[in-house]
Amino acid sequence: MKASVLVQMANQIADFWSPYPKAEALDGISKHIHAAWEPRMRDALKAYMDQGGDGLSPLCREALTEYFKGPKTPVKPAAAAKAAN
Protein backbone atom coordinates (compact mmCIF):
# COMPACT_ATOMS: atom_id res chain seq x y z
CA MET A 1 0.00 0.00 0.00
CA LYS A 2 1.28 3.45 -0.86
CA ALA A 3 2.54 5.65 1.96
CA SER A 4 0.23 8.45 0.83
CA VAL A 5 -2.79 6.20 1.40
CA LEU A 6 -1.56 5.16 4.84
CA VAL A 7 -1.00 8.81 5.76
CA GLN A 8 -4.47 9.74 4.58
CA MET A 9 -6.05 6.90 6.55
CA ALA A 10 -4.05 7.63 9.71
CA ASN A 11 -4.95 11.32 9.51
CA GLN A 12 -8.63 10.45 9.13
CA ILE A 13 -8.44 8.42 12.32
CA ALA A 14 -6.71 11.31 14.08
CA ASP A 15 -9.35 13.73 12.76
CA PHE A 16 -12.08 11.54 14.23
CA TRP A 17 -10.41 11.55 17.65
CA SER A 18 -9.32 15.20 17.64
CA PRO A 19 -12.40 16.56 19.53
CA TYR A 20 -11.75 14.19 22.44
CA PRO A 21 -9.50 15.00 25.40
CA LYS A 22 -5.90 14.56 24.29
CA ALA A 23 -5.10 11.46 26.36
CA GLU A 24 -8.26 9.75 25.14
CA ALA A 25 -7.53 10.77 21.54
CA LEU A 26 -3.97 9.41 21.65
CA ASP A 27 -5.22 6.15 23.13
CA GLY A 28 -8.07 5.89 20.63
CA ILE A 29 -5.81 6.43 17.64
CA SER A 30 -3.32 3.83 18.88
CA LYS A 31 -6.00 1.28 19.67
CA HIS A 32 -7.66 1.73 16.27
CA ILE A 33 -4.36 1.32 14.39
CA HIS A 34 -3.55 -1.78 16.45
CA ALA A 35 -6.97 -3.41 16.14
CA ALA A 36 -8.00 -2.52 12.61
CA TRP A 37 -4.77 -2.40 10.60
CA GLU A 38 -2.99 -5.53 9.49
CA PRO A 39 0.67 -5.94 10.51
CA ARG A 40 2.00 -5.05 7.04
CA MET A 41 0.17 -1.72 7.17
CA ARG A 42 1.49 -0.98 10.67
CA ASP A 43 5.02 -1.93 9.59
CA ALA A 44 4.80 0.34 6.56
CA LEU A 45 3.52 3.18 8.72
CA LYS A 46 6.36 2.61 11.21
CA ALA A 47 8.90 2.76 8.39
CA TYR A 48 7.27 5.96 7.15
CA MET A 49 7.43 7.45 10.65
CA ASP A 50 11.11 6.49 10.87
CA GLN A 51 11.70 8.50 7.67
CA GLY A 52 10.14 11.61 9.18
CA GLY A 53 6.41 11.03 8.82
CA ASP A 54 5.79 13.98 6.48
CA GLY A 55 2.11 14.75 6.07
CA LEU A 56 0.93 13.16 9.30
CA SER A 57 -1.01 15.48 11.58
CA PRO A 58 0.68 16.45 14.87
CA LEU A 59 -1.90 14.49 16.89
CA CYS A 60 -1.38 11.43 14.70
CA ARG A 61 2.41 11.70 14.97
CA GLU A 62 2.25 11.92 18.74
CA ALA A 63 -0.06 8.92 19.00
CA LEU A 64 2.07 6.84 16.64
CA THR A 65 5.30 7.79 18.37
CA GLU A 66 3.91 6.44 21.63
CA TYR A 67 2.32 3.42 19.94
CA PHE A 68 5.54 2.34 18.27
CA LYS A 69 7.42 2.49 21.59
CA GLY A 70 5.51 -0.64 22.59
CA PRO A 71 3.10 -1.67 25.33
CA LYS A 72 2.87 0.27 28.54
CA THR A 73 2.39 -2.73 30.78
CA PRO A 74 3.49 -1.91 34.31
CA VAL A 75 6.51 -3.85 35.49
CA LYS A 76 5.85 -5.93 38.59
CA PRO A 77 8.28 -5.24 41.47
CA ALA A 78 9.69 -8.78 41.37
CA ALA A 79 10.35 -8.58 37.63
CA ALA A 80 12.05 -5.21 38.06
CA ALA A 81 14.30 -6.64 40.77
CA LYS A 82 15.26 -9.57 38.53
CA ALA A 83 16.07 -7.25 35.66
CA ALA A 84 18.35 -5.16 37.89
CA ASN A 85 20.44 -8.22 38.80
Image (cartoon, rainbow, N blue to C red):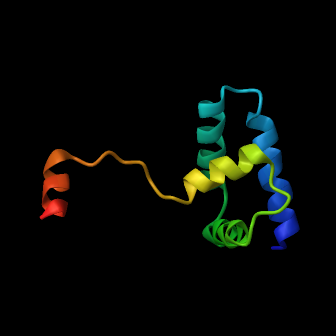
> Can you say whether 25 is above or below 84 in the image?
above
Q: Position of residue 56 (x, y in %)?
A: 80, 55
Residue 70 left/right relative to 78? right
Which one is nearer the viewer's eye here, 42 or 80? 80
| Residue 67: % across, % down | 56, 54
Q: Is residue 67 toward the left or the right of residue 47 in the image?
A: left
Residue 65 occupies quadrant: bottom right
Q: Residue at x 51, y 58 (%)?
A: 69
Percent x, y of residue 24: 61, 31
* Position of the N terminus by quadrant: bottom right
Q: Residue at x 56, y 51 (%)?
A: 66
Is the residue 72 above or below the residue 37 in the image? above
Q: Of residues 13 and 76, which is closer to you in this image?
A: 76
- Seen in the picture, residue 60 relative to 16 is either above or below; the reply is below
Task: Count the numbered circles shown.
Answer: 0
**Residue 63 placement (x, y as % from top left):** 64, 47
Q: Quadrant of residue 64?
A: bottom right
Q: Name the quarter where the C terminus is drawn.
A: bottom left
Closer to us: 2 or 50:
50
Q: Which image quadrant is residue 84 in?
A: bottom left
